[in-house]
Image (tube, grey):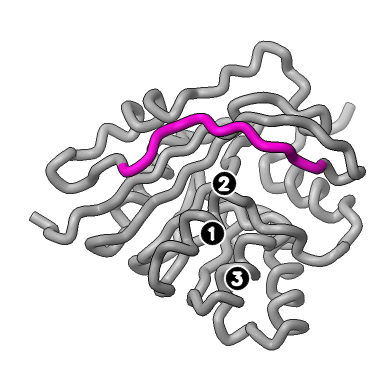
Amino acid sequence: MTDAPTAESFWEQHHRARRDAGPGHPNPVLTQTAGTLPPGDALDLGCGAGGDTIWLARHGWQVTAVDISNAAVERVRAHSRQLGIDHLVNGEQHDLARSFPDGQFDLISAQYLHTPFALDRARVLRTAAHALRPGGHLLIVDHGSTAPWSWNKDPDTRHPSPGATAAELALDPTRWSVVRADTPHRRATGPGGQRATVTDNVLLVRRHDRTS
């Protein structure tokens, strides 16, 4: 009988098992959103292979890349060194169920922050909203459908709508406002080259310029 995996060991094994083919492509909603904003300090929650982190840094953002997997964080650091942008990337290992990076940010990105382990996601995302500078944006992109290559094969998986996610955050509307809440479809490519149409649940929140 073996011990049940922890969240850290599960994701560490997941990332170590993946062939390192570079940071990969950035998530399209992230590039669409960040491309309209002036570069500043960004936080990439659950950076994974690092496609978003690298894209942001190459477009002038100072990025803190966070993941529960040390292997993921080390790969992002290595890719940023290879590209000569390591001065713009700070990699940190965090189990968001236990700790959150310090600092304030102009953009916080939570792309597909899903896990099979217990995580008070609303608390994490609420903490992220409070870590925004005035005028900063929190971008949350969730799966709205299950891709054929997803690690989660549970047919009963519930995909919370953008409105449901916003309600869970319970942010003070005098201090934060919802800029975008929709469910776009797109053609996506899986790690094995598979193609499928997937749905994203997108929520973009802005912290108001005033802090009181």
164 displayed left or right of 45 = left
> What stretch of residues is rendered in magenta?
179-189
Q: What element carries label 3?
A: strand
Residue drawn at (52%, 55%) of the image: 32
Residue 44 tag number? 1
Judge whether residue 209 is colored magenta: no
Q: Count neighbours of disc 2 (C-alpha within 10 A) and say few if under 14, some if 14 to 19, many if 20 or more.
A: many
Q: In which quarter of the image is the C terminus?
A: bottom left
Which SS type dominates the magenta stretch?
strand
Count of numbered badges drawn on the protein: 3
Q: Which sits in the foreground, 46 or 143?
A: 143
Task: Report the amino acid beneath label 3.
Answer: Gly
Above or below, 74 relative to 72: below
Amino acid at circle 1: Asp
Q: From this view, report whether residue 76 is shown above or below residue 110.
A: below
Give residue 1's mark.
Answer: none
Mark 1, other Cα within 10 Å: few <14 / some 14–19 / many ≥20: many
Marks 3 and 1, the one that precedes in the sequence? 1
